[in-house]
Amino acid sequence: MRLIPLVLVGLILAVTPTVHADDTTPLSTIAFGSCAKQDQPQPIWDAVIETSPQLFVFLGDNIYGDSEDMEVLRAKWGQLADQPGFRKLRQTCPVVGTWDDHDYGANDAGAEYPKKRESQQLFLDFLGVPKTDPRRTQEGVYSARVYGPPGKRVQLILLDARYHRSPLKTGYQPGEPGDGYRGKYVPNTDAEATVLGETQWGWLSDQLKLPAELRIIGSGVQVIPDEHGWEKWGNFPNERQRLFRVIRESRANGVVLLSGDRHLAEISRLPANHRDGVGYPLFDITSTSLNAPSGNFTKAGIRFANEINSYRVGLTYFDVNFGSIQIDWNQPDPLVRLQVRDEKGGVVLQQKVPLSALRAGS
């Protein structure tokens, strides 16, 4: 790893974008992604910039820090900040985000990670978050903001599914051949187990009651898929149900979920009439990785990944990718395009959803 002098790192982390999203201009193009190896080339930023995003959202594993040494984490954040394409992106649009396990500090870690307070400050430094921001003193990096004028408001809610998360449980037993490629985790059904922690749960409920036409909720790990054995909200089934219940009981329309972590891309949909449904189709767009694709499947001798996801719409994409949300506010019923794009910017997965379809009873 090439270490960057701390003085230079400070200068890099202080870079601010020259273009700002605001409350008067509607958001019509949002880019997002996750899983970026900071010490490897990141050519994908050119394709991201070509979509002219007004906002870029990091969904976690933004670096592979995996250390309890804050100087190591600081240097790795500096490597990402010094990537030429990323520096250009920062001059194009604001960059916001949440974290997942590797940039949090340890693989699959939750509340037990001992340096989470110190790591939080480095993460906020990277994003250029002011010292007076509430995230500097709260426990966790969760945040929310509403962009755009009334009638065209987009609320972005970014969850922290690491800081308070209870321990994972292992013990998955493989099924019959053809049952799918799976991980090692099994559901933690402990009544006290949590993903967000009570303070963040209360905050989320309050946020969902604010007025907005479209609401984007970002989570480092997948929310809707629950049949694989890797990290996901489904490892805590009570908390997954609680999330759907909070959305439903808050009467929050227009919710779309974003997720990362998996080194693959797919679009999942929870039907409106599902037993845990929110009253309208709920989509979870998983986009990952920005520069570390799922070649690990073939390296492990697996020719394809037969991973079961009953909620998947369309196919799974295993190569380098980023996500894009395109909102056409000029139509009488605004059209929302939920996309996954490849390294050259081509659309490889898409769902077109009228905004009216993301309303209870639609």
Image (cartoon, helix red, strand yellow):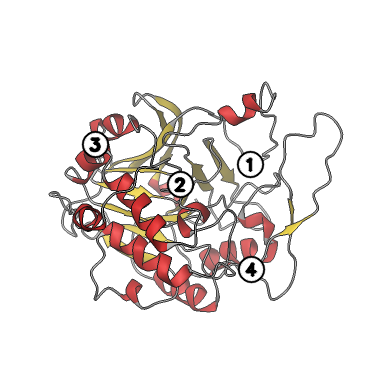
Are there few (<14), some (14-19), or many (20+) residues within 10 Å of tag 2?
A: some
Residue to which mark 3 is pinned: 84
List the residue tagged with mark 4.
166
Q: Earlier in the sequence, mark 1 or mark 3?
A: 3
The residue at the far left in this view is: 18
Quickly name the residue at label 2: 357
Give SS at disc 3: helix
Give the answer, above or below, for where 293 lies relative to 229.
Answer: above
Marks 1 and 3, Cα distance to the nearest angstrom? Answer: 37 Å
Q: Looking at this view, is 6 or 234 the one in front?
A: 6
User: What type is the residue that disc 1 sits on?
Assistant: Tyr
Q: Nearer the viewer, residue 73 or 60?
A: 73
Tell me how far mark 2 sits from mark 4, CA to CA.
Answer: 35 Å
- Residue 338 versus residue 52: which sits nearer the camera? 52
Amino acid type shown at disc 3: Pro
Query: What residue is pinned by disc 1?
Result: 311
- Residue type indicated by callout 2: Ala
Q: At x 56% / y 27%, what residue is drawn? A: 295
Distance (Cα) linking label 4 and label 3: 38 Å
Question: From the viewer's perspective, is the residue at label 1 or at label 4 nearer?
Answer: 4
